[in-house]
Every structure is written in structure tokens, then in C-alpha cells.
Image (spheres, helix red, strand yellow):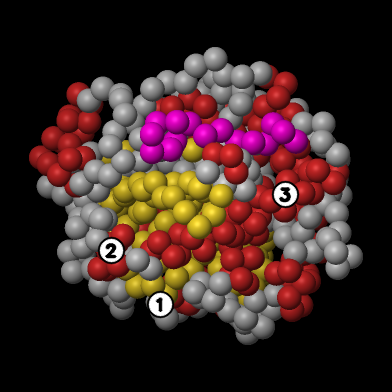
Amino acid sequence: MRVQERGDGRLRRRAVAAAGALVLTGVLSALVPAPEARAAGAPAVSAPTKTPGAPGAPDAAAQASAAAAAATDSTSTRPALPAPTGPYAVGTVTRHLVDHARKDPWKPERGDRQVVISLFYPADREPADRETAGRETAGRETAGREPQHRTARETGPRTAPHMDAASAAHFGSARGAGSFNYHVRPDAADWTATRTHARVAVPVAHGSRALPVVLYSAGLGDPRTWNTGLVEELASRGYVVVTVDHTYDSSEVRLAGGELAESVLPTLAGASPSEIDAALRTAMRARVDDTRFVLDTLGSAQWRQGLPRGLGDAVDLRRVGMAGQSAGGFTAAQALHDDRRLKAGINMDGQMDFPLPDSTGSKLSSVAREGVDRPFLLLGSDGPGAADNRASWASFRQHARGWQAELTMAGAEHGTYTDAVSLLPAFARQGALSEEDLRQDVGTIRPDRAVAATRAYVVAFFDRFLKQQDGRLLDGPSPRFPEVGFQGKPTS
């Protein structure tokens, strides 16, 4: 069910559209058994020769622009994520966390809040024979439940899928975000076939020290896997990236015992505006609380010792940033407002207000009313829905007291800042969604240009404010990216 009305904003429309689509199509009859959720993987193409961002290292913007065309084939009918362009290979590991200090806000009867995260990080490239052996080993395995904690020796250097099999099946069903957020016909796309460029549980890159950390939060209803292309790019350039699944908000979350926790958005079907408003406020509170809990967990030296070899000692928790798309961008801003452990943030096309006013008489969130005092980047689209951001973004910018800039990508739509821009064109050529739906999802910008621009500006921002390495891309318009316009001058 598509909601066409304007004025209440993307946050509300996405919630209502998801609810309608999920409820009208009924309950999925069966789920495919699969291993515990992991994060992404396939062997990287270049060995680590220089520390990303260091003097003499490849320039992120230039290399992303040059590589994205090859990574995002505009004619292929085989969906694929673009390869990372940094000098490091990528490793990944998934962990299931339980917050014993908090009951689940959506289902308190289920007990303590459960959150699943994946970490992506720089790794050394393995010799070809070991990579091949790892893939062969992975291919011989059968699906089944895995232990909650696995070591590098137990998992081996295999690559991981974009989504585990059960999650991919649900994501592509009538009850999943592929349908209710991105218009892909239920069960028309094979989401299990897409792989990424990270190897599971391999050691951190040799000699890694003081790696900055970036948390990532996906849009309302989207899973943590739904910007793996961008996440892997950051990891290949020397960041530890932690993707967060917001259980019962995300389309589906594979929990430790094998249970697939589905989104609660169906409960919004037919709901009143006040009920929708309350649900969206619950979602945002849960997201920020999840973020703060993940920060607490990362701060535990004992917990970090259970990560792949060397990773726990390599993270630098004095340099932590956060990025997100849509509601995830709102989450990044609100978390930065609420928690000073976060030093910089990026909001990719996420409005920061609610359908109805709160006790203050304002629809604006506290971060939109008060801004933040640390660096923040707003990346927007220019489709009809961009108007949804204006009120909250204008207030945020007016009250921000740190460096901040607002950029708009010409020809971009809401989903351009996700894996949709890389995967959906090929699915459209297969007939899984219409060309009009594709345009509504990702706009008219060429996919390779969208990938290159998003990667370049995100990397440039975190390089500048977490690594103190400034390539000057954020100073103003660049001839390398004519599709990216600055809304006024960056301010500090």
C-alpha cells in the first residue's frame, strides 16, 4: 500500500506504507532455516599498502569516482554491491547483544532488549589459495543453527552474504522491506544471491592501531545490512564500522537462538494519527537507546576481547562518529545530541520531526530545536519528498554550534543513499519492479555517480573530523562531483 499524501513527512509515510503492505498480504507461511545472521563478504581486490587517509594514500574522492563506474554496472541483470576502493580488505563479524538494564520497548513481555550488530573493519588480504579454500568450505556447509559465539578458527576466512538466508527470504517477501519500502514485487527477487566483500572473523589488518569507529543506523523498517556498500567502503579506508539492527523496527532481525524477529509496523495499519505519532516516538527512543547501549558495549574491554584477533585492541573509542539514512540519520543526530561520546555525525535524507506536536507545542525533535555543538553533515535528495526535511533541517542548522553543512544530490531520491541504488536497477531489468517504481526509489542519477559521490563525501567528512585529515572536498562545490550542490556555505 502506497501513501501518496504530502505534508506529514517521510517518517510517517514510510511507517504507514509498511503497515499497510504487511497487513494486507498476510503472514508468511514458512521461513527458510539459516545460520545465525552474519555480515557481508567477498575477497577484496587490493592489498593494504598504505594506511587509509595517511599522506600518500589514494584520495578517497578521486578513487571512489574512478572505481564506481566499474563497480556499478548499469546494464547487468545480476545485482551486485560495488566493491570497496580503499587500500584494505574488509573483515566482518556479527554479535548478538542483550541489554539487561532495559525491557524491550515494543514487546516488554519478551524480556530484556536484544540488539544485533555487525562490525566491519580493515583486514589484510589473504593469499588466493586460502581465499579459495574458504569459499569451497563455505559452499560445502549446509544451513543450520550456529553457536552464538564463534571464533575465527571455527568460521574460517569465508565470505558472508549480504543477508543470511532466512532474513533475505523475509526481506523479499510481502512482509519485508524489499516490498513495503522499495516496491519490489514479493518473492520476485533473489536476495540470497548477493554477496559482499568482507571475510568472516578474519584478524584485523596487521599493525592496526587506534582505528576510529563509525556507527551506522538504517532507515525505518530497513535492516542493518541495507547500506553495506557504503559501510564496506569506510572499513576499507581504515574505520571500524558497527551496523545496528533495531529489533522489531527493522524488517527482520535474526536473533541468537535462530528466531526471526519481524517488524511491528503492521500494528500501525488503520491506526490514528496519535497512535502513529506515539509509535514513531517509541521507535526513535528505542533507536537512540540502542545506540547508547552499543556504545556501552564497545567500551567494555572484556567484551572486545571476544572479537577477531587484534580488533578489540585496535578500536579508538575517543574517535567515534555516527551516520544513518532516513530515520537512521535522525537517530545519528539525536544520539549525537544526547551522548557526548559521539564526536561527529551524518544524516542522509532523514527528517527530524514527528506528525504531531509534543508537550512543548512543537513537532520538532529536541535535536532539531536545539542543534548540536559537534560537526554534522546533512546529505539530501532533490525529489518531491525533500520538502519533508525543510522545517527540521532549517531549525537544526539555525541552532547548530559546530561545523555543519547541507548538501543536495541532483537526481537523487530517498533510497539513493542506500544499497537500493546499486541493487534495484538490475532487479528492475529482471522485472521485479517497474521502471517508475525504480525512479521513485532511487531517482534519475546514474547509480555509479550516486555511489561515488556518497562514498566520497561520507569518507571526506569522517576523515576530516575523526582522523584530522582534510582533503578540502567539504569546503565547497567540486568539479569532480557536479551533481552535489551546497546549500549555503559550511559553517563552524
**Crowdedness of circle 3 by 10 Å Cα count: few (<14), some, many (20+)?**
many
Q: Tell me which segment is drawn in magenta.
A: 254-268
In percent of width and height, residue 187 lies at 54, 19
Residue 41 locus on image (x, y percent): 32, 42
Residue shown at 19% from the left, 58% from the top? 309
Residue wearing tag 1:
318
Is tag 2's residue or tag 3's residue first in the polypeptide sequence? 3
Q: Residue furthest top?
A: 29
Mark 1 near mark 2, Cβ–Cβ under 8 Å?
no
Q: Does 260 appear in magenta?
A: yes
Which image quarter holds the C terminus? bottom right
N-terminal of the two: label 3 or label 1? 3
Which amino acid type corresponds to the residue marked 1 in the rendered image? Arg
**Which amino acid type is shown beneath numbered disc 2?**
Gln
Q: At 60% from the left edge and 36% from the top edge, which residue is drawn?
A: 263
Amino acid at the residue labelled 3: Leu
Q: Which residue is mark 3?
A: 280
Q: What is the total number of numbered labels drawn onto the structure image?
A: 3
**In the rendered image of this protein, does residue 142 appear above or below residue 351?**
above
